[in-house]
């Protein structure tokens, strides 16, 4: 078992604003190192700890996915063992990668997420792919969450009904104003709203205590859907795993704030393992409670299964209770996502993969221009069409994890003397399992399109997974263009 090596509180990385603007070694090749990129004023503040990391992960992860995913999974896999099994597989996948992500996050304590790992281990272009797909996906997620908040708000307060987009835009701008004031405001909001998510456990407890016999009674009224077999079953499993991976993604939220964590060598691994345990514990309990109260026939295709389960326990007030909990839960998710995307764009700007002016940080520790552009993109997603982007998220997420696990292997070979406050337990086996699982998932995601193309010759319209792959393949011209533009600024 790997052990933590305590990092003294006084030992901190130098802040970019405290250093000379003389180009580093990496700058000689046309890029900027994060420790040499000048700032106009201010700096990221080292004020975060383990509990913030867990709250960011829990706040970001336990959101709309757990409301919709059970209904979709039950429709694809109407079997209690397969239904519950894909959630267990998702938890094991997260656990197998947690130690690898913990080593990377502790060894490379930079804000910006997985982008930093791929850039250092695999080069500029790999980092660009991860950074841009992560940034756009996170902006899209923020927009989707804001729209769901608008929909739920209309159900709770009737005068707000019919103003979904307006509510979504107002909420996004509201969090922009809050986070503009500084990281301490974002931190406080995240801690409070994430803690309120434990209201889900009250609903779970009520279902387990008062739900005895309700599923069996309801099952007699409607038979369960039939389970597919053969190729349709394999496709159903892939779709179910996509839904699970999208729902659980975010357990590594602490890595977006590496420069802002007081003791990253200690707190990053603890936050990651604490996040995986908390998220999967809550998700498994919620699904167990749903199965205890509702038969598979009422879960399959239900887009608000928690509300249906709560109505069985609390009567007509159940739907309202769940929607109120969800609004608070989604506010926490939106706050976390806006924090994430601003840090990713900030890190890329520090490295010369976006405009240098976006490295500007205000006195409160907020990368102001990065937050502003991320907010604008989120608003555009709300006002425009972002369904395809949202559908591609699971592919982007797993592609980024694949490159991150590959990065750990590359860095162990490339930089064996790197200071690693935490070393992944079970390496290389746990990292290898996570890498293999990610690669197989990506292959399985595009396999249906390939099968259709070979058998029918039809290649259009592509599935979300294939479209995501095409976008990644076409990203190279954008990468070269931004390199050319940023190099001209030097």
Image (cartoon, rainbow, N blue to C red):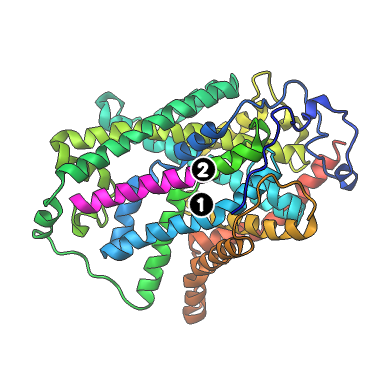
Q: Which mark is residue 393?
A: 1
Taking 221 as reference, is 39 above or below it?
above
Which residue is depicted at the point 49% across and 64% down? Answer: 461
Which residue is depicted at the point 13% across and 59% down? Answer: 219
Local packing at callout 1 (Cα closer than 10 Å; few below 14, some 14-19, many 20+) is many
Taking 186 as reference, is 132 above or below it?
below
Which residue is depicted at the point 65% across and 26% down? Answer: 368
Q: Earlier in the sequence, mark 1 or mark 2?
A: 2
Work out which residue is located at the far bottom of the displayed protein and give it: 455
In this rendering, position of residue 223 left or right of residue 53: left
Q: Does the rendering let one see residue 165? A: no
- Which secondary structure, mark 1? helix
- Which secondary structure, mark 2? helix
Q: Which mark is residue 140?
A: 2
Q: Which secondary structure is most common in the magenta stretch?
A: helix
Q: Do residues under tags 1 and 2 come within 8 Å of each other at their CB atoms?
A: yes
Residues at marks 1 and 2, CA–CA distance in whole angstroms:
9 Å
In this rendering, position of residue 86 left or right of residue 269: left
Q: Is residue 263 magenta?
A: no
Measured as percent of width and height from the top left, residue 101 is found at 61, 50
């Amino acid at each position: 078992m790997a052990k933590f090596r305590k990092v003294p509180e006084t030992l901190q990385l130098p802040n970019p604003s405290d250093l000379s603007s003389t180009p580093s070694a990496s700058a000689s090749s046309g890029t900027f190192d994060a420790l040499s990129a000048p700032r106009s004023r201010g700096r990221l503040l080292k004020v975060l700890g383990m509990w913030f990391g867990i709250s960011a992960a829990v706040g970001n992860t336990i959101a709309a996915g757990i409301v919709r995913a059970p209904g979709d999974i039950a429709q694809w896999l109407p079997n209690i063992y397969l239904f519950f099994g894909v959630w267990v597989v998702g938890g094991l996948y997260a656990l197998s990668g947690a130690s690898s992500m913990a080593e990377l996050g502790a060894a490379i304590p930079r804000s910006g997420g997985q982008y930093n790992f791929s850039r250092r281990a695999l080069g500029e272009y790999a980092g660009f792919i991860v950074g841009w797909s992560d940034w756009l996906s996170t902006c899209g997620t923020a927009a989707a969450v804001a729209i769901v908040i608008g929909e739920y708000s209309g159900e709770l307060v009737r005068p707000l009904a019919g103003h979904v987009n307006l509510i979504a835009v107002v909420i996004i701008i509201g969090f922009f104003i809050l986070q503009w004031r500084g990281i301490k405001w974002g931190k406080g909001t995240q801690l409070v709203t994430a803690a309120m998510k434990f209201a889900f456990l009250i609903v779970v407890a009520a279902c387990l205590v008062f739900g005895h016999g309700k599923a069996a009674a309801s099952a007699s009224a409607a038979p369960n859907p039939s389970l597919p077999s053969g190729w349709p079953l394999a496709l159903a499993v892939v779709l179910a795993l996509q839904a699970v991976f999208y729902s659980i993604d975010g357990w590594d939220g602490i890595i977006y704030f590496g420069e802002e964590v007081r003791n990253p060598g200690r707190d990053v691994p603890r936050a990651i393992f604490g996040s995986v345990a908390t998220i999967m514990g809550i998700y498994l309990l919620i699904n167990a409670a749903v199965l205890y109260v509702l038969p598979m026939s009422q879960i399959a295709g239900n887009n608000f299964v928690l509300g249906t389960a709560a109505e069985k326990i609390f009567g007509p007030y159940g739907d309202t209770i769940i929607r109120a909990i969800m609004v608070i839960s989604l506010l926490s998710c939106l706050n976390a996502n806006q924090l994430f995307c601003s840090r990713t764009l900030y890190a890329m700007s520090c490295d010369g993969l976006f405009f240098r002016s976006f490295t500007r940080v205000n006195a409160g520790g907020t990368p102001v221009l990065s937050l502003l552009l991320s907010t604008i993109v989120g608003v555009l997603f709300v006002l425009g069409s972002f369904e395809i982007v949202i559908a591609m998220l699971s592919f982007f997420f797993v592609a980024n994890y694949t490159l991150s696990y590959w990065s750990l292997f590359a860095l162990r070979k490339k930089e064996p003397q790197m200071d690693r406050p935490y070393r992944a337990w079970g390496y290389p086996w746990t990292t290898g399992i996570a890498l293999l699982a990610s690669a197989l998932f990506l292959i399985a995601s595009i396999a249906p399109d390939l099968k259709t193309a070979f058998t029918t010759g039809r290649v259009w319209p592509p599935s979300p997974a294939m479209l995501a792959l095409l976008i990644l393949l076409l990203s190279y011209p954008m990468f070269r263009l931004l390199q050319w533009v940023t190099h001209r600024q030097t």
